[in-house]
Amino acid sequence: MEQFEVKYEKRLVAFIDVMGFKELLKPEPFNQNQLSRYYNTAFKYLEEKESLYLKNAEDDKFTNIFVSDSIILSVVLSGNATNDFLKAGRLISTISELQYRLATHASVWTRGALSIGDLCIDSQKNVLVGPAFVQAYELERLANYPRVIIDPRVIKEFSMTSDKFVEEMRSSVYRSWLIGTNVQPLWRQSDFKNDAIQIDWFSYAFHDLVDLNPFFMDIIKRQYSNQELFIKSEFLVRYLIESHSRYRSEFFVKVANNDTLKNRNNEIARHLAALSSAVNVNELLI
């Protein structure tokens, strides 16, 4: 038998956990249908991304692995800071859209963390091992509602402050949106207190015109089911308000002059106002 040798590469790795996965494993037809929707939504999206990576960014060596209630995504780094920053942007964009699609297309909430370091992935031997994965796995526990947070080690890799990392990532070619710890929207003082840099996945809602009613109804259903989910839902709602306010402020002129975007903005605003008494819907409408 050929001897296996662990060979580490420096990689970015995201560990993404499906929240409420145990409930989906119960043998009721509804749970089985939703579990199938989860896998089909994730498989379809990641197959699309694999094709794009192979066509446009083969050197990233993009990898996705499903293990029980989690998804692991990873890209290899080159040692060139400029190229690696673009790789980080591509991966963050991938994570962001995956979270959005699962939440709005499959009613599945996810949380996780993105870390960096040594990692060995061998698809033929089905091996994934290394300190980078352990870091992402352990950090995921701190992402206590549907979000993916960024390990400070990732920021350190690019010799930036956290604010500079967020700013540069937002202005990159992939427009990977992040929310930093210093939350200061342009149009109001936020009550959203963030304890980590996190990926802004809800911003996709402005352009993906899927019906959002099931998504917002799902929030209400979970919010009033038990105390644990109530807390997570409250944090989620504050994040959604923050995401909406940032998009509205950044692209106000574009949204105001596009009937489709304006209608979508106003639809989301009304949903958010129904979820939180802190929201003045007239301030959100365009």
Image: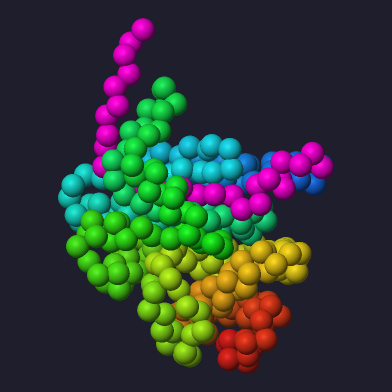
Q: Is residue 4 magenta?
A: yes
Q: On the rendered image, what quadrant is the N terminus found in?
A: top left
Camera sees residue 178 = no
Which of the two residues, 69 or 106, is positioned nearer the viewer here?
69
Residue 138 x/y as whole percent: 44, 50
Q: Residue at x 43, y 71 (%)?
A: 195
Residues shaded magenta: 1-28
Name the residue located 28 percent from the left edge and 41 percent from the top edge.
Answer: 118
Relative to residue 226, is residue 11 depicted above or below?
Answer: above
Residue 10 is inside the magenta segment: yes
As drawn, is 67 to the left or to the right of 269? left
Q: Position of residue 126 (x, y in %)?
A: 44, 26
The extreme left residue here reads: 80
Residue placed farthest to the top in the image? 1
Q: Nearer the viewer, residue 146 or 252?
A: 146
Q: For the view shown, which residue lies furthest in the right direction?
A: 28
